[in-house]
Amino acid sequence: MHTMWKGSISFGLVNIPIKLHTATEDKDIKLRTLHKECHSPIKYEKVCPVCEKEVKNEDLVKAYEYTKGKFVVLEADELEKLRKENEDKAVEIIDFVKIQEIDPIYFDRTYYMSPGDGGSKAYGLLRKALTNSEKVGIAKIIIRSKEQLAVVRVYENTIVMETIHFPDEVRKPGDVPNVPAEDKVTDKELETAIMLIEQLTTTFEPNKYQDDYRTALLELIESKQTGKEVVASAEKAPAANVTDLMAALQASIDKTKPATAATGTAKKKRVRSKVKKEA
């Protein structure tokens, strides 16, 4: 597994040399843009609109636009010095909290942590302490020239670091337009909705979910690559246009009702009918 960051993490006076490894991978299928006429890949050139000519990478500088059309230019060596000063610092766990106190909206990316040379014992100590205390660490780290707030926790016997957003990076939910201030639902509607939730409640098994679009796209690419005829799959039945909320809830319950329950109900009805006839 590729190491994307080396350094150390500390809590109190305990210092642990560690390596970071990306825990997830992007499996999106990258499509190129071609010229329709000759199927040549399109080039995206950097062109200065004033000089009207292509600009090479060595002629580019970074700048901050503090007002429209006004810039503060930052030299490459200034940015590199600032980055090195911060990146060379060890990752320090600032606080320990319960993970239930952190809303999922804050989470960004996940990295696996492995111990560096001579760090196995201290790594094991932190892992055991986090597990037994049922706490997670809050730390700061510089990754790719950006300071990140992070959560340090244990996942399947491995310490992981979850980068999380700073509070000012999370937009206020109160700014979302058209959110109703109060719930205008009847007790019956709420009861039926909860019944539907209970009926659809299960144990989370990640392996049962898959990216259907990516699978279909790969099949399409393979079919065209091998010269096979592309056959469209049967269309999914359109969703019923149910405008009444109660009717929609009931229809959803009927649709998701387990087959065994339905069979049992039908069997009970037949038994009741038979008893009435004999009486």
Image (spheres, rainbow, N blue to C red):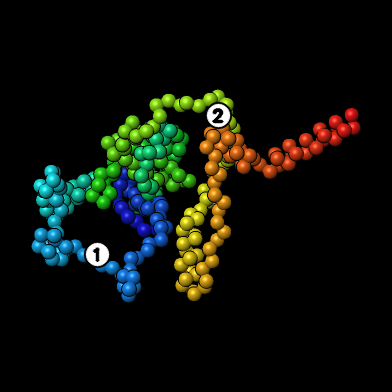
**Residue nearest the viewer, comparing 7 with 57:** 57
Visible in this render: residue 162?
Answer: yes
**Residue assigned mark 2:** 189
Q: Residue 44 carries which label?
A: 1
Res. 198 visible in picture: no
The one nearer the camera, 86 or 132, is 86
Q: Residues within 10 Å of mark 2 (few under 14, many from 20)?
A: some
Residue type for callout 2: Glu
Alpha-carbon span between mark 1 and mark 2: 54 Å
Residue 222 pos. (x, y %): 48, 69
Query: Looking at this rendering, what residue extends furthest in the right direction?
Result: 278
What is the quadrant of the C terminus in the image?
top right
Give 123 or 190, whichever is nearer the viewer.
Answer: 190
List x then y, in percent, for residue 123: 39, 45
Residue 146 picture location, percent across and down: 25, 47
Q: Dot 2 lies on which element?
A: helix
x and y percent of residue 33 in the render?
Answer: 33, 65
Q: In this view, does 102 lie above or below 83?
A: above
Q: Is disc 1 surrounded by few (<14), some (14 to 19) or many (20+) residues within 10 Å? A: few
**Dot 1: what SS?**
loop
Q: Do the residues labelled 1 and 2 touch (CB within 8 Å)?
A: no
User: 153 or 122: which is nearer to us?
Assistant: 153
Sequence-wise, which precedes: disc 1 or disc 2? 1
Left or right side of 11 for 225: right
Q: Quadrant of the N terminus?
A: bottom left
**Which circle, 1 or 2, is nearer the viewer?**
2
Kind of residue sitting beneath label 1: Tyr
Residue at figure coordinates x 48%, y 46% from the top left = 156
Does 54 sit left or right of 162 as displayed?
Answer: left
Picture layout, residue 54 above or below residue 265: below
